[in-house]
Amino acid sequence: MPQDKNRQYLEFEKPIKDLFEEIEVQLHNAQKNPKIDYSVTINQLQQSVLQKRTEITQNLTPWQRVQLSRHPDRPYTLKYIDKVFTDFVELYGDRNVKDDKAMVGGFASLDGKTVMVVGHQKGINTKMRQYRNFGMANPEGYRKALRLFRLAEKFNKPIVTFIDTPGAYPGMEAEERGQGEAIARNIYEMMRLKVPVICVIIGEGASGGALGIGVGDRVFMMENSWYTVISPENCSSILWRSWDQKEKAAEQLKLTAGYMHEFGLIDGIVPEPAGGAHWDYQESANNLKPFLKNTIEYLETLDPETRIQQRIEKFNKMGFWDETKS
Amino acid sequence: MRHEEDFEANLAGEDGKSEETKNSWFKRIKKGILTSTAEKKETPEGLWSKCPECGYICTVNDLREQLFVCPKCNYHHRIGSSEYFEILFDDSQYEVLFEEIRAKDFLGFTDLKSYQKRLEETWKKTDITDSIRVGKGKVKGEDLVVACMDFEFIGGSLGSVMGERIARAVDLSIQIKAPLMIICKSGGARMMESAFSLMQLAKVSGKLSQLSDAKIPYISFLTDPSFGGISASFGMLGDLNIAEPGALIGFAGPRVIKETIKKDLPEGFQRSEFLLEHGFLDFIVQRKELKDKLATVFSLFKN
Ligand SMILES: [Zn+2]
């Protein structure tokens, strides 16, 4: 397990970085002194890396998990498409205004079975982050997604969506072209799609921008993703009147996969490699794949009307209130 | 130009700089409406109101005669569910339903205060039970179900109670075969209910699709302000989407957009007239013409 030179580290990942640096030193020593055997030391250090990764995952605060969900090395939608599916044919455009680079989609094969995959896309470097608008889709992104959902429905292909957005883009043109309407339409239409729909939150699941491709028969979350109505930062600024309470907001919002599952708002949690999905893209994909395959297989045993009925019922149960006798 | 309003304070359960919290008269007449049924139209003598748009001064009683629309500049003052119900329903007769559904602090959410405490304070302060009330009555002899938001209850925020009350309003509409109208007036999500608040968008959309299957008309009536989750779900899903003049309507709030684009927003941005020009509203209706226009629309659907 060599250190990837381009790897980026979060603050709480620093101990891992230190271990890798130590490994570098030992490798260098080994080169300088070929007669001395460093393999045991190096092996031990590599074991420590794995141990540290596991430790980190086990002790994350909600805010750290939010940070992990935004890790610059984290796999995004196109990475999962690449590692889970084959024969991906990307389809562009909403047939109306433009092609939204923050939303990608197309047909792909899941071990021989054709599915429609649609997801938010973030950029992998500074330049691409701009190009992908940081994963913040405009109305045309949501309308592109809906076009692809319709295409899938027509040819009776199941739909998989990957959610990873800090929110729908809050821009002037987005408002002019009806950001609210675009998301509303998607939520409404997804509820009624005749084909199986599976949604996976792979990173950030912020608000309407996430739900705009998030209504499905089954909704899963990757272990280190989050999903709620507002980002911890914005929640802090509104409810605490300060940008400094994001940690507290993350805690109070109970936005992690564990809580979401406990609340019955999602259907399952996909485990990530020790330390987070960014440590091993293939392992992350391998973990996710059976969730998709088994779920599609099961959902296809139901007829469309039953699926739609159950989808409506499922979301209709969400909420908490007291019912007093009047 | 109208002063810029920050409705985020209202979402936090505090008094913002919005009209009704700024003007104490409004609260006092509201209390009057809700506490005394016998003389509910009586407003204490000598209460005066000043139009925030043009500065026109008149008594509150005079303003009430005008359905809280400024006689000088047509500014539509922000009003609550009781006022809308009285304007809409024949002889001001209506039944308020589903009041037994009450919010609770399931998550144990605490910001500067606990959600539970905020709820209790708001219940005490406003005399209303949550941010939406469902009324059933007749409009020119025909049944109508109206779910109307109250901005003064934590900024009209969308939470589980709003979702469930709308869900039941939909069931009622289907059961009695009466059209449904939702009067929107909300700053956005009830953040203290976290993801549960978000899921109400999906929940209500599912219910609306059942209403659609039953071929019962649904009208979304957008009033000032209608933001966030409201516009990203049932607010924009009407068979007809209509609005009051000058209402601020949008997905992202003006502050957030300004911070994003680092520019001032143009005059009229996100107002009803702007939405109509961009194709998102069927029409804008004056409050004084609301009842007549709705009656016409419903009869056209029916006949
Ligand atoms: Zn005026």
Image (tube, rainbow, N blue to C red):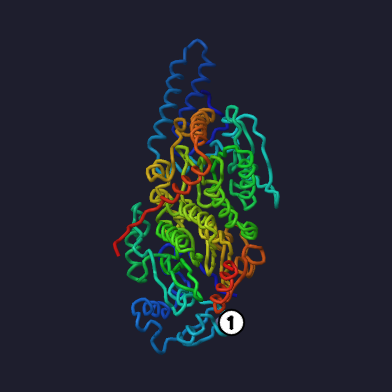
Counting from the top left corner in percent of width and height, residue A224 is at 46, 39
Q: Where B278 sits versus A128, above or below?
A: below
Left or right, A93 with reference to B121: right
Residue B102 image offset from top left, x and y in percent: 35, 61
> Which residue is outermost to the front?
B303
How many neighbours does mark 1 have within 10 angstroms: few (below 14), some (14-19), or many (20 or more)?
A: few
Q: Quadrant of residue A52?
A: top left
Which residue appears at 55% of the width and 73% of the height? Answer: B295
The residue positioned 51% from the left and 86% from the top of the image is B57
Please tell me in which quadrant of the rendered image residue B236 appears.
bottom right
Q: Can you say whether A81 is above or below A252 in the image? A: above
Q: On the rendered structure, is B197 left or right of A110?
A: left
- Residue at 39% across / 65% down in the picture? B130
Residue A60, given in percent of the width and then of the height, sits at 40, 39
Residue most extreme to the top: A35
Figure quadrant, ligand 1: bottom right
> Between B292 and A230, which is closer to the camera in this rendering?
B292
Answer whether residue A202 is visible to the viewer in this image: no
Q: Is residue B87 visible?
A: yes
Q: Residue A234: image x %, image y %?
A: 48, 55
Toward the left, the furthest residue is A325
Q: Is residue B154 above or below residue A249?
A: below
Question: What's the residue type where badge 1 is placed?
Answer: Cys
Q: Circle 1 marks a residue in which chain? A: B
Q: Farthest residue in the bottom direction?
A: B46
Viewer-proximal residue, B231 or B294?
B294
Question: Is the residue marked 1 within 8 Å of ligand 1, measured from its CB?
Answer: yes
Residue of label 1: B73
| Residue B243 vertical position relative to residue A143 in the rendered view, above or below | below
